[in-house]
Image (spheres, rainbow, N blue to C red):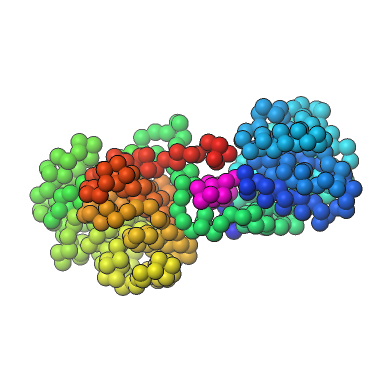
Amino acid sequence: MISSDRMAMVDRNAAALGVPRSKLMESSGNAVAAAVRRRADPGASVTLVCGRGNNGGDAMVAARFLREYDVRVVLLGRPESISTRIARENWDALRAAELDAETCADSRAFALHDPDVVVDAMLGTGVTGALREPEATAAAAINDADATVLSVDVPSGVDADTGDAAGAAVDADAVVTFHDEKPGLDALDAAVEVRDIGIPEAAELFVGPGDLRPLTRDPQSHKGDHGEVLVVGGGPYTGAPTLAARAALRAGADLVRVACPDAVAREVQGFDESLIVRSFAGDHLAPPHLDRLRELAVGHDAVVFGPGLGDADATLDAVRGFLAEFDGTAVVDADALQVVPDVDTDATLVCTPHQGELRKMGGETSADWRERADLVREFAADLGHTLLVKGAYDVVSDGETVRVCRTGNPGMTVGGTGDVLAGVTGALAATQPPLHAAAVAAYANGRAGDAAVEESGYGLVATDLIDRLPHALRDEQAGTEADA
């Protein structure tokens, strides 16, 4: 089962893997035509009511496969308002073939003419809310018709994720949906067919540009809407918490604060004027600092715990104490990772070990990434937390779902790139579900490293990644013809 948002990401990932939406539309249109054939004999009259997006494009393709039927295509709106390139191309193909294809921009002129089958292809899974005109009038006419009603992907007016309708909706007899069932279809009194349209399994397994889709921003956003992150680190090291904090800013967090010992606070602040430093007494984290840390953590959307803290016994005791009473979201990295298996916590944790740290936590690994993926999933299930295990192929799992990231290169073995990754993960975990935050963080961190190597070759340093993060978190092809 797959949500509408996730389906849009998978579509985009499929295009990045060489299976463009135009090919998928041919397959989905063929599936719609096959569903019509199962419900009507040759010669029956079929009216396909098409919207102006890719859902309508699926039905336009289907019309070309229904040569043995009396086919009529009705486009709701003007041809110039068709919103995607591939839907426009399929409309043009219908007209060029001189099939019965007409437009209806005025709801008052809409009429079905008593077909045997109506194909509802007005609105797809990505559209929610009450139907507008002319779709509302068309839906009412479809519901009043004495015809078999087949909806494409989801009945128009129905939320594919919930099965709810904000107003009028098509009452379908059957639904043909693609790739996987949508959550809201279970609530419908309709026969649901799920058809494979050729999306490769890799489009769901491997993190790709489609996974960046949820990172878009509301133009009316305010400061803080995109996350406030607290980085707890430093003491033995000053660079690590600074790298994590700067990376969190470049990954989109609105505010980033660093909690570190007094002994290194001035050095941390000196790295970047954009950071807000909140110090605590001494030269390393210890249990007496817990009240101060808990006070600082309040109001933050995510805490990044570990960069540069070191592994002093008192420091690890403090990590245990903090996590035991914390109920927010935390990214745990570096030496702090070793205490996670022994802590009973209500916190939502994303742990970011490399394979040596994973073993130290009690997990197992393998040189084969497929075997490693299974081992990571099993260990994440045992821990009850999300794991992002770093390697040539990063493996991310929450104990159920597994995602694999293939970006990155051998130049990223240099110290500090893991601190950058922890910061990116913290920024994303402030606004995204843990599994998705970890997967996208790995993808973006690797893309930034790949861009650095492409520009300058090996010999990169961790700071080379940070300024490349905004570009790495943007899908350059989104909204272009490749994604249309």
Q: Is residue 13 magenta?
A: yes
Front in this rendered view, residue 228 or 91: 91
Q: Position of residue 360 (x, y in %)?
A: 26, 70
Give the image quarter of residue 468. top left
Residue placed at 14% from the left, 64% from the top?
Answer: 312
Image quadrant where one finds the C terminus: top right
Q: Is residue 29 magenta?
A: no
Write the start and end of the magenta stretch as one range: 4-21
Residue placed at 45% from the left, 31% from the top?
Answer: 220
Q: Position of residue 149 (x, y in %)?
A: 80, 48
Q: Main secondary structure of the magenta part?
A: helix
Give the image quarter of residue 127. top right
The answer, for residue 365, to whether it is visible in the render is yes
Image quadrant where one finds the N terminus: bottom right
Q: Is residue 224 found left or right of 264 in the rendered image?
A: right
Q: Position of residue 362 (x, y in %)?
A: 31, 73
Give the image quarter of residue 406. bottom left
Determine whether 7 is above or below 226 in the image. below
Residue placed at 90% from the left, 48% from the top?
Answer: 43
Q: Position of residue 342 (x, y in %)?
A: 29, 70
Residue placed at 75% from the left, 57% from the top?
Answer: 191
